[in-house]
Image (cartoon, grey):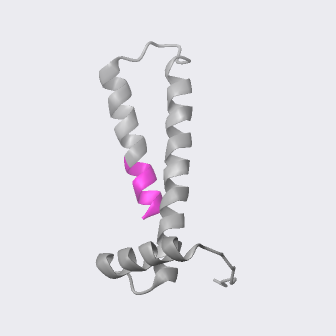
Amino acid sequence: MTTEMITVKMEDKFLKSIDKFVEKSGYQNRTEFIRNTLREKLEESELKEAMIQLSKLRGKASKKTSDKEFETIREKAFEELTKKFK
């Protein structure tokens, strides 16, 4: 896997807050923290999209789905998404 360098400009005050968080949270450096934070945001966005798709499908089944069945389906979907993103 290749990596590409990008440049991000931040205000000093914001960068100091990041540095404090990096040190407190055990990240090795800013890059690790920023990369991890961006990855989490992407996963959150993809999970949100999957939940929207599930909610759209709920009313389209030819057979009515009970709340309990829907919850079971939702849990299975979360398990699969969790496996995919770990």
> What residue is at 50 percent from the left and 70 percent from the top?
14
Which stretch did the figure color magenta? 79-86
Up-down relation of residue 66 to residue 3 (above or below): above
| The quadrant where residue 16 appears | bottom left
Q: Is residue 12 left or right of residue 74?
A: right
Residue 75 vertical placement versus 45 (above, below) = above
Relative image position of residue 18 (x, y in whole percent): 44, 74
Q: Give percent across and percent down for residue 77.
A: 43, 42
Quadrant, the C terminus: bottom left
Q: Nearer the viewer, residue 66 or 32?
A: 32
Image quarter of the N terminus:
bottom right
Locate residue 20, reporting x and y percent: 37, 78
Front residue of 31 and 19: 19
Q: Residue at x 33, y 20 (%)?
A: 67
- Dominant secondary structure (helix, strand or loop) of the stretch shown in magenta: helix
User: In percent of the image, x 52 and y 57: which residue is there?
Assistant: 41
Q: Assess whether residue 42 is covered by the magenta stretch.
A: no
